[in-house]
Structures are given as structure tokens and as C-alpha cells.
Image (tube, rainbow, N blue to C red):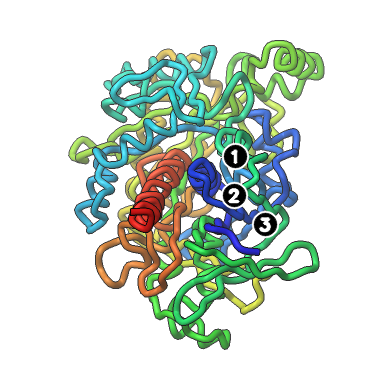
Amino acid sequence: MQYDFIIVGAGSAGCVLTRRLVEQQFSVLLLEAGPKDSHPWIHVPIGYGKTMFDYRVNWGYTTESDPGINSRRMYWPRGKVLGGSSSINGLIYVRGQPEDYNAWARAGCTGWAYHDVLPYFRKAENHIRGADAYHGVSGPLTVSDIGESHPLCDAFIESGQAVGIPRNDDFNGASQEGIGYFQLTTRNGYRCSTARAYLKPVQGRTNLTIATGAQCLNVELENGRVTGVRYRQRDTIYTARAAREVIVAAGAINTPQILELSGIGPKAKLSEHCITLVRQSDAVGENLRDHLQTRLIYRCTDRITTNDDLNNPLRKLRIGLRYITSRSGPLAVGINQAGGFMHSRPDVARPDIQFHFGTLSSDSPGSPVHRFPGFTLSACQLHPRSTGSVHIQSPDPERYPAIHPNYLSNDHDIDVLVDGLKLARRLAITEPLSRYIVEEYAPGPHHMSDDSLRDFIRDDATTIFHPCGTCRMGSDQDSVVDPELRVRGVPGLRLADASIMPDIPSGNTNAPVVMIGEKAADLILDAHLAKATSRVA
């Protein structure tokens, strides 16, 4: 089995890469450890509450005990299906701040400044608002507005304006700062994953082979160059060869695992598991970043919440029929509808807190909703200084790697989250949102002092599902990949997923990963089409 390119991982970046390479008539083998995206709840926007714990389409990782959150272990869902996490995420489309990418460039990631990556965000988009300086309409990925307002969301936005936060109807436009409704990766009421947007239109091409249920075991090398991969599909192990390159796009957890299983990583870690060292790269598996959120839950005065829709059989039937007949209503917009980006303190240079506002509540993300009318306002720190690691625990590819987030290991992070909770409370006591509140269910009135809020955060804070950075990009020799995403010292191998981020973007990470896929495709095509042209000449 020989192909021009082998792509490991049919996730947010892998599907993008596949589409772009196949369109240029290269032969591609796309490997995905999970199944096809035929699970019905994948395609209903609110359905990610169902897929979050469904191990048929989800790796279902659990972190190691973490001292920063009182030795709790955190559940980390990651997509294991065509489309990867774009098939099970919360659908929110946020690019981050221009300063994020300018900082990448200053850190040595040449070609990744905001003016470099904006064309790729635009290239990916089919934005329902039309084209402008920030948005495109010719891309495969449909980006939609939430079709209808909700009185609770409107009250949240108006209360934000009352305390001096500007309204922002486009967090992906000229400025991210402000409060408003999110944009979603939906199309006509369905989820628009990268599998649906990028892969489906080309999946019948003769130069594309898609292998589902195919877990990559390691990359194969000859004379120091990557020439292919070994993978297991059902009970058979196959070897496939790549005439040009192997691109690993397996995500922030699986990508460093595959590298270490292939002998690329920290020498001591590989020696511990009797894996032959191919290339010492101490940064593999390090620099793990994630966004941590703290959730405030409120009992609502009126039965207008999604809790009420889901707890009442007639209302549940009504929203189901509404979705079936018009692809609208609560099922069509997901869970978090409104949000905001703001400063935790006046002296902070740029927004460092993100709010997610949802018209439902539960004890934990993905668990059954409360029986009472409730809504949730979560505060997330955008620029954590705490970093963790992901490393193999065994040479067995079936054994999950050890994930150490090291949440709140830097005191700055918990200080920002305390300020975020205070700001959220300030919104909650401000009209018009305050008139919808019976009481604060969590943290509750017994958590008022800063020290008490710190205790609450360590006891209750949870991931918002944005792991990245474990194979960081840079120009220094310690970085795992160079700015063209080539693995240092290992010809024929590139990475293209959230693992290459040198730092975490300011917001939800799916849109930046799609951008990485688009830019990676251009980097690869520039190299290989130029070679093909020179040979013809």
C-alpha cells in the first residue's frame, strides 16, 4: 500500500488537509481510529451532551490526580470519529485575538502572525453574513449566527452593557472584546464538522482511501526518514508507505503519544519503556495548555430555561417537533449561546476572561439538567501560565498516555479566575439579569471571600476542553516542529493539529485548528508542487 501522503487523524485539521491534498490529485490515505460519523447525535447541535460520554465516538481520557485542583482527576472528552473533536464539540466558532498570533511570530514562528493567518481563517469560511475584511464565503466550513434570541441571553448582554462592557456582534471581527451572541459551526440546523464540510465532498475520489477503526501504532523510518506508518484495523496490523510525507494530525494527546511510540521524544522517557531512540526531542509531550472554567449556576424566576424544556414531556416533544420541522429551537443552537471577552482588571492589556452563558444548568458538563429552572454563567481564564505534560505510560499503543495538566500550579491563574467570578457576580446583580434570579445555586452565598472562592475553584473548576501545545512550534532547536510544521531531525514527517500551538489562543480552539489545517496544506503543497514543477521543467 503506497500513497503520496498518509494523514493520521481525521479530525479538525486532518479533514482539512485531506481535502486540499486530494484536490491537487495527490493520493492520500487517511487513518482514523474511530468510526464513521454516523452517530445521529453528532449532527444535532445540542447532541454533544450525548456524545461527551459515548466511548464509541470519544477517547474518554482521564487526567492523572492533579494537586492544583485538590488531587481530582479530570475527564477529558476528545473526538474519536470522522471529524474528530469537531464532531463532538460545543460548535462555538472563535478565532482568538490578533495578539495571540503576533506573539507566536515574535516567539519564532515565522509566518504565523495575525496578518499571515487571517487569510486562512477567511479561506476556510462560508459565513452566512457574507464576505468582508474578516470573513470569507467560498470556504467549506459554514459559520452561522444563532437564529433567534433568548430573553436570558438578552438580559445577560444588557447587564454587561450596563456595567460598561461593549456589545460585540462579531467576536471574530475587528475586535474580540465585548459581550454578545456566539457564532456557531452549523449549517441549516445541523452541525458542520470538518468531516461534513471538508471530507464528505471528496470521499468518493479514487485518489482518497479512508480507513476508519484504524489506530496508528507508530511511524516507520528508513535511514532516518519517515517512510510510512503501522496501524491496526480490527485484528490486523498493516504497514502503509508514503512516497512524499506522513502528516500526524491526531491531536494534543495522541500526537505526542505516536511520536514517543515511534522513538521521537525525551530520551529518559523512551528508555523507561525500552523504546529505541530515533530522535531526542525533550519538548515532545511538554508545554500542555488548557482552559479551566468555573461555573456559576443560578435558579431562574421563570420557567423559560432549557431545563424546563427537557424536564417537561410536552415541552420536550414540542422542541423535538420544532427541530424536525424547521431545524430551529434549542436543539439547533447547542448549549452555550451567548458569551463575552473582557478584562479581569482595568490594568490588564487585553481581555483575559471569557464568559460562556447557557440557558440550562447541571451538576457537571454533560450530566442531566437540574429539575429546577436554571442557567449557567462560566468564567474561563484565557491565558493560563500553568503548563503540564502528556507522556506514554507503556509501549502498548492501546494504553492511554498519562495526562498531567498541572492546573493552577501558577498562582496567577487562580487569581484571574477569582476576579472572573467576581465580575460574573457583578453581572448577575445588575438589571435586567438580576430580575431573573431567585438565588445563586453555586458557588452560593457561603463562598464570598477571596480565600473561599479559591477553595471553590480548586474543588469545582473543570476543563473547557481546549488541550494544546504538546509538540510546540518554534525556530529554536528545542521546539518539536519548525514554522513549516516539519518535525526537527525527522525528514518526511510533519504535524498539523493543536499540539503545535506554542501558546493557547484566546478562546475556543476549534477554529484555530481548522486554520492550522489550511495553512499546513499550503505549506505542503508549496513544497511538493514546486518539486513536481521543477522535475517537469
**What's the mark number on residue 33?**
3
Q: How far apart are marks 3 and 2 (CA)?
A: 8 Å
Quarter the C terminus occupies: bottom left
Image position of 291 with respect to 393: above or below: above
Q: Which residue is at a point 38% across and 46% down the rendered structure image?
A: 522
Q: What residue type is labelled 1?
A: Leu
**Residue at image mark 1:** 199
| Residue holding disc 2 | 10
First reached walking from the N terminus: tag 2 or tag 1: 2
Where does residue 27 sit, x and y in percent of width and height?
57, 52
Q: Would you call the spot at circle 2 few (<14 residues within 10 Å), some (14-19), or many (20 or more)?
A: many
Helix, strand or loop at label 2? It is loop
Residue 97 shows in this picture: yes
Q: In which quarter of the image is residue 196?
A: top right
Q: Nearer the viewer, residue 394 or 312?
A: 394
Q: Point out the frontmost of discs 2 and 1.
A: 1
Compare marks 3 and 2 and give the one earlier in the sequence.
2
> Can residue 464 be seen?
no
Q: Where is residue 124 in the image (x, y as percent from the top left)?
A: 44, 33
The correct choice, above or below, for 412 with respect to 66 in the image is above
Are the residues flagged by discs 2 and 1 in contact, CB closer than 8 Å? yes
Q: Is mark 1 on a helix, strand or loop?
A: helix
Label 1 crowd bin: few (<14), some (14–19), many (20+), radius 10 Å: many
SS at mark 3?
loop
